[in-house]
């Protein structure tokens, strides 16, 4: 049970570095709570552990809801976290106190490359704008967001700094 708890803690730590990395920086130092209907965990160096049903991960202002979370371990470390849902929903408050909301059918965070890929009806909303598309990649090292380029289109709305958040929806 202690190993499962450690695995879940690592899962939550990796997820907190998601597109919400623009969120509250102190969240990573907060306690993390993980809930799911059931789990199937293997603690081997090369393994997958799965959380199924009503997966909820909270840490500080970060809240993630998914149907399923799979933790892929390689050489003893967590290498990739895959969240799936209808949709996966992520919410967080940034250091400026502004909310950021994201959702997609699948969110994959690969730790070795610091890359987050959101797939399937991606919606990212912030008070100053929004982004929508089928595929969005977020590079944590550079802060670069890439969308589209795969035959699907991306749409963005960028509001002037003085506009109210309620006007952010396209």
Image (spheres, rainbow, N blue to C red):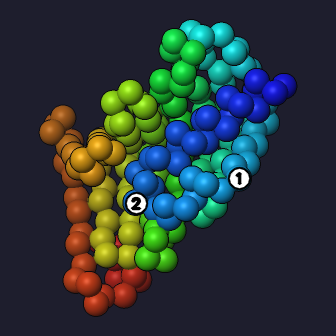
Q: Which residue is mark 2?
A: 22
Q: Residue at x 75, y 26 (%)?
A: 4
Residue plotted at (54% across, 21% down)? 77
Image position, residue 105 (x, y; %) = 47, 41
When the figure is inspected, residue 169 is found, relative to residue 34, above or below; the finding is below
**Residue 140 image offset from top left, x and y in percent:** 33, 45
**Mark in front: 1 vs 2:** 1
* Res 51 seen here: no
Q: What numbered label is drawn on residue 154?
A: none
Q: Residues within 10 Å of mark 2 (few under 14, many from 20)?
A: some
- Nearer the observer, 108 or 84: 108
Apparent side of residue 124 relative to residue 26 in the rendered image (left or right):
left
Residue placed at 39% from the left, 65% from the top? 125
Q: Is residue 41 left or right of residue 142?
A: right
**Measuring 73% from the left and 48% from the top, which residue is drawn there?**
33
Task: Give the Cα distance between marks 1 and 2.
Answer: 19 Å
Question: Within 10 Å of the Cα at label 1, are there few (<14), some (14-19), or many (20+) other Cα atoms?
Answer: few
Which of 121/97 is in front? 97
Pick the quarter of the image with the N terminus. top right
Quarter in which the C terminus is drawn: bottom left
Relative to residue 137, is residue 157 depicted above or below? Answer: below
Residue 121 position within the rendered picture, expressed as x and y whole percent measured from the top left? 38, 47
In the displayed structure, 91 sits above or below 129; it is: above
Q: Quadrant of residue 63?
A: bottom right
Decide if residue 32 is on the left or right side of residue 83: right
Label number found at residue 31: 1
Number of labels in the image equals: 2
Mark sitting earlier along the chain (1/2): 2
> Compared to 3, does 105 lie above or below?
below
SS for callout 1: loop
Which percent across, then down, holds residue 76? 57, 15
């Amino acid at each position: 049970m202690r190993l499962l708890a450690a695995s879940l803690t690592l899962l939550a730590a990796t997820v907190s570095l998601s597109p919400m990395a623009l969120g509250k920086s102190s969240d990573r130092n907060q306690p993390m709570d993980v809930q799911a209907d059931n789990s199937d965990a293997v603690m081997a160096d090369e393994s997958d552990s799965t959380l199924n049903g009503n997966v909820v991960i909270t840490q500080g202002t970060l809240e993630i809801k998914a149907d399923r979370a799979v933790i892929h371990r390689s050489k003893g470390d967590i290498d990739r976290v895959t969240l799936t849902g209808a949709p996966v929903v992520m919410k967080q408050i940034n250091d400026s106190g502004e909310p950021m909301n994201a959702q997609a059918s699948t969110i994959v965070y690969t730790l070795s490359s610091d890359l987050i890929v959101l797939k399937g009806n991606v919606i990212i909303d912030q008070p100053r704008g929004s982004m929508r598309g089928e595929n969005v990649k977020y590079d944590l090292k550079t802060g670069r967001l890439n969308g589209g380029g795969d035959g699907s289109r991306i749409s963005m709305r960028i509001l002037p700094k003085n506009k109210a958040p309620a006007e952010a929806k396209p």
